[in-house]
Amino acid sequence: LERLLEVNNLEVSFKTYGGEVQAVRDVSFHVDKGEILAIVGESGSGKSVTVQSIMGLIPTPPGKIKNGEVLLEGQDLLKLSKRDMQKVKGSKISMVFQDPMTSLNPTMKVGKQIAESITTHQNIKGQEAKERAIDMIRRVGISNPAERYEQYPHEFSGGMRQRIMIAIALACHPKVLLADEPTTALDVTIQAQVLDLMKNLKDEMDTSIILITHDLGVVAETAERVAVMYGGMIVETAPVNELFHNPKHPYTWGLLESIPDIDAADKKRLVPIEGAPPDLFSPPKGCPFAPRCKYAMDVCVEEMPPAFSIDSGHEAKCWLNDSRSPALKELVAAGR
Ligand code: SF4
Ligand code: MG
């Protein structure tokens, strides 16, 4: 496997009237070539801020990237000038958002919007850009692409508009596509179609995908690996099967408890876990999940759990995985 993107020790904060919010705390992960990585978590867990940092979309101020690097094929995107980052966007890395209506220009033909993305980022103009755009409309599974090229966003359904956004994002053959809740606004059938489309295009165009979602059904359906975020941190990373069948973090257990039967995963969404998410103004020095965790031990409050290596590609930041943990014995006895 070839490493494509690597995020190391990312820390992002925001200044607010109430103080400084630690939105992302020491986050590290990677994406291999041709892989789909899902980042899953409740809203406010830091997943959107993480991908926005990768895209250079954090407004500074009030935001601040305090530490870390984002290496795309070895090049640190956080060190690029605005201008150089602009070049990277669209040609190497692009993004699809939740609501296509706010990202599409309502007064411009959709075909032109795709063609514009092609001409801005590549040395392709005029008729050739138009042909490319029509080809992209076809590739995202919209029939009569030449006629559709001439239409405006309001003439498309929600699912079709999201396909157009994907066409714009992929028109320049990026190496990584960042998708932030791309199907959340769509109904279930359309959502499945759009996810299928993304999977197929990923193979066809050899693009890696970072998929942000709060929906475990989407994770099971689409991703190869998962990073679970909580309180601005990644608390568990694992291959999808491993995460569903051998989770090693109480927060992940909580997420999965909403799914009685893994095979019915596509029908279930995350249910909120009891208790409030951590206060990110003054995050606890120990495990962020401790106030809500029924297994919490003294050490959990005192000391941040390190990333325990469970298996190849599987890590969990939870003291229960320490062989000295007394609670571990109880869990083993209970068959966890
Ligand atoms: Fe619970 Fe402690 Fe594990 Fe945190 S480290 S999830 S508080 S057992
Ligand atoms: Mg979000």
Image (cartoon, rainbow, N blue to C red):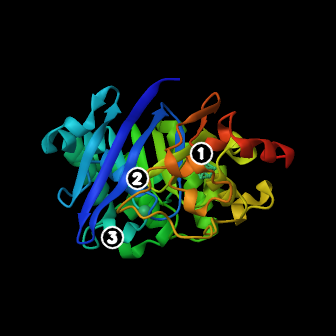
**Regarding mark 1 in the picture, which secondary structure is present there?**
loop
Residue on which the image places disc 3: 102
Q: CA distance from mark 1 to mark 2?
A: 20 Å
Which residue in the protein does label 1 denote?
223
Q: Are marks 3 and 2 in contact (CB under 8 Å)?
A: no
Question: In terms of depth relative to the viewer, which is nearer, 46 or 72?
Answer: 46
Q: Residue at x 13, y 42 (%)?
A: 83
243 or 205: which is nearer to us?
243
Q: Which mark is residue 263?
A: none
- The residue lying furthest to the top in this view is 1
Q: Name the front one of labels 1 and 2.
A: 1
Q: Residue 121's quadrant in the figure?
A: top left
Between discs 3 and 2, the one toward the N terminus: 3
Rendering coords of residue 335 (x, y %): 85, 46
Whether residue 134 is visible to the viewer of this picture, yes or no, is no
Report which residue position mark 2 lands on.
Answer: 167
